[in-house]
Image (spheres, rainbow, N blue to C red):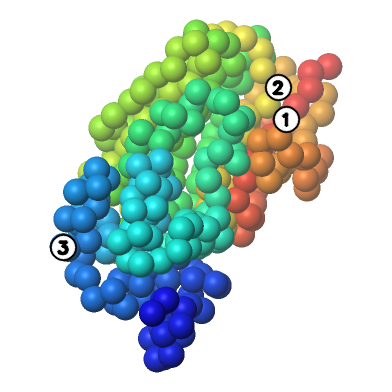
């Protein structure tokens, strides 16, 4: 008998979840309806060439994380077959906003925040922590410094994060330089340590994975501090940060060298990399120029300035 013809309440609840989401509830009900345990699902996925751990499956069904990497999406496609669901029944739900624990809702994919062909996307997807968030940003304070030649010199960052999964917890940071071939360099950390860094020299990116000094219990918060150094010496006129999740409190301040003050300074927000600027606001260029936001949707938040 087809799944959606099953009259009992469990079958109706599953049909409703597949139609409305969220993904985690639909997956949970589909697993329960199939009678298969996570260990058996893991075995069938491995046999199909898409191995997924029982821990990851558990996180998917509880909503702590969701599948986003290409190999994870392939596993979801196999799950649909194993669980007796129509093709794309679960995959389509991944296009909808999701809930992944305290403070994590309405996340967007990295492809929305970077140019479609940006080389940094493939590197980002190679980091588990970039796609399946274990640390959520509650507060982010950035301090950017510009020297007398109008070039960026360093970026100091202080984050407050909350753990939404355990035991593996990490935060991925992306920074782009002003000139191809001269990416910024991670020079110091506090309360955390880098475990992996990838440098894309030609487009000028650096991607670093940071972990707290100690493991956090779910719901516990921690402070991460780190500093990047710019060395390209090229004058620049903007800086932005890209947020996959909404709501993070964000303070961006730009310190200009004494006597070198921009003519104008504006804060802005973009919903996507190719979208129009929104919420454009004039900001005093007197150092430090700064912009503060809280409760904003996912997207790109930044500051741009022009020289006399």
Tell which circle, 3 or 2, labels the residue nearer the N-terminal end.
3
In the displayed structure image, the side of residue 173 where residue 45 appears, left or right: left
Near-viewer residue (6 or 97): 6
Judged from the image, the secondary structure of the residue bearing numbered disc 2 is: loop
Picture disc at residue 237: 2
Picture disc at residue 304: 1
Near-viewer residue (130 or 259): 130
Residue at 40 percent of width and 48 percent of height: 73
Residue at 39 percent of width and 53 percent of height: 77
Label 3 – label 2 distance at C-alpha: 53 Å
Residue that mark 3 sits on: 39
**Position in image of residue 256 (x %, y %):** 65, 24
Judged from the image, the secondary structure of the residue bearing numbered disc 3 is: helix
In the displayed structure image, the side of residue 304 where residue 99 appears, left or right: left
Label 1 – label 3 distance at C-alpha: 52 Å
Residue at 79 percent of width and 22 percent of height: 306
Packing grade of label 3 (10 A; few <14, some 14-19, many >=20) is: few
Near-viewer residue (192 or 126): 126
**Position in image of residue 108 (x %, y %):** 55, 50
Would you say the residues marked 1 and 3 are in contact, meaning their CB atoms lie under 8 Å apart?
no
Label 2 – label 1 distance at C-alpha: 6 Å
The answer to whether any part of residue 265 appears in the image is: yes
Would you say the residues marked 2 and 1 are in contact, meaning their CB atoms lie under 8 Å apart?
yes
Q: Quadrant of the C terminus?
A: top right
């Amino acid at each position: 008998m087809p799944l959606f013809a099953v009259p009992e309440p469990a079958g109706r609840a599953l049909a409703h979840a597949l139609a409305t989401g969220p993904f985690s509830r639909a997956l949970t009900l589909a697993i329960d309806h199939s009678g298969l345990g996570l260990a058996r699902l893991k075995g069938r996925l491995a046999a199909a060439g898409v191995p997924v751990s029982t821990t990851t499956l558990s996180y998917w069904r509880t909503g702590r994380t969701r599948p986003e990497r290409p190999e994870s999406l392939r596993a979801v496609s196999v799950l649909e077959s194993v669980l007796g669901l129509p093709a794309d029944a679960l995959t389509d739900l991944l296009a909808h906003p999701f809930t992944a624990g305290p403070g994590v809702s309405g996340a967007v994919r990295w492809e929305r925040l970077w140019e479609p062909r940006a080389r940094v996307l493939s590197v980002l997807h190679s980091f588990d922590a970039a796609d399946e968030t274990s640390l959520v940003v509650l507060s982010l304070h950035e301090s950017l410094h510009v020297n007398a030649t109008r070039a960026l010199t360093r970026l100091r960052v202080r984050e407050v994060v909350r753990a939404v999964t355990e035991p593996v917890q990490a935060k991925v940071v992306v920074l782009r330089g002003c000139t191809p071939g001269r990416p910024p360099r991670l020079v110091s950390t506090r309360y955390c340590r880098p475990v992996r860094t990838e440098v894309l020299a030609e487009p000028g990116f650096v991607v670093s994975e940071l972990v707290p000094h100690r493991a956090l219990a779910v719901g516990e918060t921690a402070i991460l501090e780190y500093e990047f150094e710019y060395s390209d010496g090229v004058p620049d006129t903007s800086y932005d940060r890209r947020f996959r999740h909404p709501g993070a409190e964000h303070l961006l301040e730009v310190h200009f060298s004494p006597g070198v003050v921009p003519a104008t300074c504006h804060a802005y927000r973009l919903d996507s990399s190719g979208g129009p600027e929104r919420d454009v606001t004039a900001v005093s260029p007197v150092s430090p120029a700064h912009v503060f936001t809280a409760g904003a949707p996912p997207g790109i938040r930044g500051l741009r300035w022009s020289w006399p």
